[in-house]
Image (cartoon, rainbow, N blue to C red):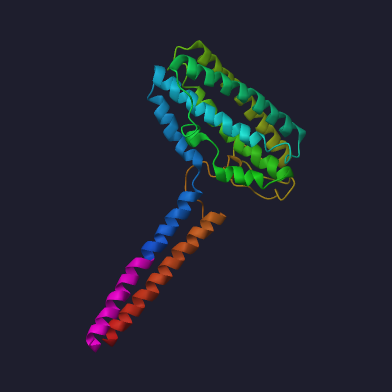
Amino acid sequence: MSQISRLNNIKAKSLALTLLVPVLLFGSLLGVASSSASPLGQSEDDMNKLEGLSGKEFEIEFMTMMIGHHQSAIDMSKLVPDRANHKEVKDVAQQIISAQTKEINDMTGWLQQWHNTTAMSGMMGGSSSMSMADMTKLQGLKGDDFDKEFLTMMREHHKSAVEMAKLVPDRTDRAELETLAQNIISSQNAEIQKFDGWLKAWYGADAMTGGSMTGGTSGTSGTMPPDSIQGGDTSGNLPTAGSPAGSGLLWLVMAALAASAAIFAGGMWLRRRA
């Protein structure tokens, strides 16, 4: 191979690397951003889907989603006895397990009785259920850290159930389902109010206004951003620059720019040498 051919080959490879590295790093950036987004962002899709249904289709979809949603609340609540610090949290977790287990049994029976179908495991829960990451996070906490995270997550979980239940009266004539929906709205709104009070009393957090954490225990002093008491990144937005995830995104951007500049400069140097 001639000297000119070798130089042309080197220049071609340099140009390819100049284009490839930013693409790969930007792909990593999107992956981090996607994994940092809230699972509750997808609950809007569930709501939109339910809003477009009525009658039999709505009943099947609503009960299937709510059975999965209830099951995730039960799974979370089963973590409480071995991890929670406050008796109030242990008591409310037991109430959740008892009430929502009964409602799952009711809905399972209605699906079979009314529509000769079952809530398949692959269909249940959908986006409004807690993610595996949320469960893993809870499993790694104890004491006040667990209580604060559990109340924050369950508060948001309850809110999505309430919003789903509010759709029922206009989309079905089943008296049993309307009664169930009203029970979900009243009981879970009451529990949300309890969670708000406990978060404020124990950790100085105003869940309704996204206030600040001023004191408390287990490393809860200092100012907490609004999203952190609203169940984490529940807005579905990308992490802010001041958050750990946001810092990671910033470093990826800087690395992509630096690598691109270095490879481009090398390619230009080789071009001049040629």
| Pick the front one: 210 or 119 | 119
Q: Relative to 86, is 173 on the left or the right?
A: left
| Pick the front one: 67 or 39 | 67
Q: Position of residue 247 (x, y in %)?
A: 53, 59
Magenta span has 19? yes
Q: Relative to 158, is 20 on the left or the right?
A: left
Q: Position of residue 36 (x, y in %)?
A: 50, 49
Q: Is 185 situated above or below 23? A: above
| Pick the front one: 124 or 155 | 124
Question: In the image, which residues are magenta?
Answer: 1-21
User: Is there any visible trace of residue 197 in the rendered image?
Assistant: yes
User: Is there any visible trace of residue 204 in the rendered image?
Assistant: no
Q: Quadrant of the C terminus?
A: bottom left
Q: Position of residue 169 (x, y in %)?
A: 47, 16
Q: Position of residue 61 (x, y in %)?
A: 44, 25
Q: Residue at x 56, y 43 (%)?
A: 132
